[in-house]
Image (cartoon, rainbow, N blue to C red):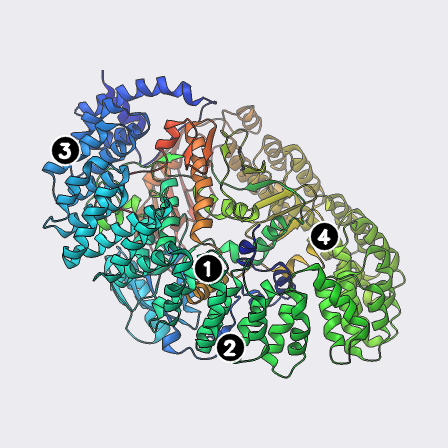
Amino acid sequence: MSKKAKANQVPRRRFLKNTISATGAALFAPTIIPGSALGLNGAVAPSERIVVGGIGIGNRGTYDLGCFLQQPDVQFVAVCDVKERRRVAVKKIADKKYGNQNCDTYRDFRELLDRDDIDAVLIATGPNWHATAAMTAAKAGKDMYCEKPVTKNISQSLVLSETMRRTGRVFQAGTQRRNLPHFAFACELARTGKLGKLQKVFAHPAGMQAMMSGWLPSEPQPEKEVVDWDMYLGPAAWRPFNKKLLDGFNFEKGGGLVGGGVLEWGSHCVDLCQWAVDDCLPPVEYNAPKDGELVARYENGTELIFREKGWIPLGSCPVRFEGENGWVEAGDSGKLVLSSNALLAGRTVDEIGGYPATYHVRDFLDCVKSRKQPKGNADAACNAHIACHAANIALHLGRQVKYDNKKHEFIDDEQANRLRSEALREPWRL
Amino acid sequence: MNISHKFTCNVVCLAALVFAVVGSVSAQDNSSKSTEKEKELIAVLRSDATAAEKAISCKQLAIHGSSAAVAELAKLLPDEQLSSWSRIAIEAIPGIESDDALRNATKSLEGRLLIGMINSIGVRRDAKSVQLLTTRLQDKDTEVASAAAVALGRIGNDAAKRSLREALAVAPDKVRSAVAEGCVLVAERLHANGKSAEAVALYDEIRKADVPKQRIIEATRGAILARNEKGIPLLMEQFRSPDKKMFQLALGTVREFPGSQVDKALSAELDKATSARAALIIQAMADRADTVDLSVVLKAAQAGPDAVRMSAIDALARVGDESCLASLLAIAIGENMDLAKAARSTLVSIPGEKVDAQFASLLPSANEKSYPLLIEIVGQRQIEATDELITALKNSDKNVRTAALGALGKTVNLKNLSLLISQVIEPKHPEDSAAALQALKVASIRMSDREACATKLANALNRLPAAFKSNLLELLSEVGGDKALATIGKAAKSKDPRLQDTASRLLGKWNSVDAAPVMLDLAKTASEDKFKIRALRGYIGIARKFSMTNQQRAEMCRSALNAARRPNEQKLVLDVLKLHPSTDGLKLAIKTMDNSKLKDEATQATLFIAQKLGRQRGNIAKLLETAGFEKIKLEIVKAQYGFGATQKDVTAVLQKQAGDLPLITLPAAGYNASFGGDPFPGSVKQLKIQYRINGKAGNAVFEEDAIIILPAGR
């Protein structure tokens, strides 16, 4: 690991110290900038506030919004949604928080992005929109917290990374597990060699299916003000209105391949596996699934294994990292299981702690001010998503594919290469 | 050939189609299959198939199509519904035919469809389109002109660059931002290809143009980086800019900037900046770990405005070394509490083995003020200094002794664990007991040989004062392993009610299947019913949550049913069988139906498990028949859900769920969720069903959320 890469991480001892004292979870704030330098001491002057707008705030987005609204230096001023019901609901939340009626509502997010007073946006649309909205926001000069899965295909992942770099924007993928103490601790053990040479990292895909998006029978289309169907479809190829498609969770998240658990869950736990292998480039080889496992291999030989069964019951979205000298497994319960208590270095699992997800939002806001790269930055998100997309392609084709990280293409495999990208519906572009 | 119908069935019926993954096939094998597939797909496009069928065919042609498919695909480009589907394929299919098709389409299309063609041309970087796009830069539709500008930027050759430069000066306001975006894309490519001078010239042109600030930011970033070291003055100019956005640009760009010259410039800039900005500049300096001037950061930590000192102290945690310790220690025991806290934090985090060595060497000569702090740091950094810490245990100051115990907890090895055990059993200062116990806990759960550790602790159990025995059991449960389990199991059967209580509670939350036999034994032999119940519930919990074979789980459930004396636990066992449906579990559920007190629950569990397994599997049907459940023909005639006169027709829902068993499982949890909402909030509703089983009519009524088992004449 380069010195620069090290500098961008929470120092190990700081991490350990923080986890030691994390019985009061707030002590694990991943902030590396003193609060006083960020205007967090006491009341926050208007000039130091981060003015935020929301794009597509549904169930998950409302949770995120709650995290944002808890932060003293956030002023949430506007919401955009193609669904009237959600526009109204989010405005109500924001207005209640501030005791006024000032939260503006928009149907077209480009109008929200046109506002000079907005510094950052929370993007929590369905996955169909994530990458396109994020890149449009970046070009409009906004920093952004964007829910996952962030991209629909490999090409979008690469363009996302390149766009954030070119525009100089701060991008945080909604991979909040990077700022949850127990997951961060598990990754830290793997990254710092405490498990010995890393051999296998496991991710739970929760359903290995690669699906193609489709077309449901036409139903009467609501008024544009109620549901703007054209904007809802956005970059997805046209199809008639059908209310079942309004569930963004199941609509067009993987482009050519809708992407079942490999992408949906992978954007959570493969992302952690990527962190465990020190955010290196994605695996170079992906095999067809066999007996509930899809095995991918990094250039250094470490295996990334999508595994359906065999997990210790530690809650959803588990990961497991195995090295020559030990292993650790963690899940959404906030708990860890380790091969040896010695790995805990004197703490208990309870002391390390697991929540809340507010840390990830705080990390983003601090980076908006410092311009440091947050934990779920675009490069990290790009690599994790490429791993998911490539695995999905192996799954879809039912055979091994090999990926060249320098050329960003599958080796001698035109079918796989054609699944790297997908045309966006007009007028949208990346 | 009726391909259309075939695809209707296979591809378009539902929103998504799961493609079966069959076997393992090589990339080469697929090429001949693709040709055949392509022919079928082209035939769909040529047929009178529905738009839906054609759309999905386009998507598949993106994988299987060749230039042979382009002509048919191109016919769909003017179709508002199918244009984007067609482009999905055309954009993916290599060859000039695809480029030609997109170019030709631009001649006749306008508005959004035209923009789609232009965007795809940009993605394909079709150099032959530069002239066409250049013309479109002047399109009266500003969205079209903007798309052309970005497409030219993506193509990025000399001709495209020329067109964009010319447009930058003359393009209308609404187009100029996209032209600048195109220019930035070209400049990025030039810089990446080593043509930095050309890139700089283009970036500078953009910076001078009347374009939105974000374009200026992008161009300024590029202009700084493309100039390499000559870009440092421009970078520093941004650090001094009154414009917050430009200052932020500088903070981001300096983290990307190569070489060490910029670190010197940053150091000079620090003195000129306001304290708020200086604090942020220091963080950026520290993120340049390869080249940061440590002396500058250390100096900033030692004196100056508090905000800057705080930032510098924090930064030293990442980039500091042993040369910083004296200063940080002085701050850490100083009077400014905020700075002291930050310095303590940094002293724990600052990296390096030399730092550890220096801390250890400072311990013997520490003064009264720094002694407890140094001990604490030694502990937190896990520096081996046992002898020094034992000396500290004799100190008259309780704070020193507490710190030493804490540090020993974090550093002592297995051999010296008895040191801490002694401190718990026979403390020289009784007020140190709690700290000693906490230290012992920290040390014990850290030990890699947990069996050896547990043995030492178990041996100490009898020597401990009664008040501490429960604490030691808690500690053993944290350590885990066979010895710990056996010791706690033994304590659970002791004569001391307090130990029984603690031990049975700890067994109940034991996180491995190893505890199962111990808990089953306790469930049968514990002295009090409450401990038996607690142990049994823990045993059932293991069967519920841990991975094991179906046979093992069924066997555990059988043992639990035998041990259970109350319906509550018996029902929990049936829940486990339902949660993990298996043939072994089904057999047990059927056997349990013989228990008259559990008959209803066991019947429901039997049907539930059978339904999950499916009759077709193995001997399920035979097992059910043995239990008196014949395969039935169930027809739902009518079903209503509601209260009083307010009734909702739920016939269709139940008809869909009905199978060949008298059990009906609903699609969601609860009646209201399954039947599309609560028809009469605030009242307990009823579900009334008219049905026929094997042609024989019947009626049944169920209270809200009751399990639906129809009388089947068993």
Residue labelled with disc 1: B255
Q: CA distance from mark 4 to mark 2?
A: 40 Å
- The relative height of residue B623 versus residue B545 in the rendered view (above or below) is above
Residue labelled with disc 3: B104
Crowding at mark 1 (Cα within 10 Å: few <14, some 14-19, many 20+)? some
Are callouts 3 and 4 both on one chain?
no
Q: Name the subunit of mark 2.
A: B
Are callouts 3 and 2 both on one chain?
yes
Q: CA distance from mark 4 to mark 1?
A: 38 Å
Q: What kind of element bears circle 3? A: helix
Q: CA distance from mark 1 to mark 3?
A: 46 Å
Residue labelled with disc 2: B307
Q: Name the subunit of mark 4.
A: A
Circles 1 and 3: CB atoms closer than 8 Å: no
Q: Position of residue B151 (x, y in %)?
A: 23, 44
Q: CA distance from mark 2 to mark 1?
A: 21 Å
- The relative height of residue B510 versus residue A219 in the rendered view (above or below) is below
Q: Amino acid at mark 1?
A: Arg
Mark before the other along the chain sequence, 2 or 1: 1
Side of B338 relative to A117 (left or right) = right
Q: Position of residue B118 (x, y in %)?
A: 20, 41
Q: Residue furthest bottom?
A: B335
Residue B241 shows up from this direction: yes
Depth check, mark 3 against mark 4: the one in front is: 3
Q: Residue furthest top?
A: B1
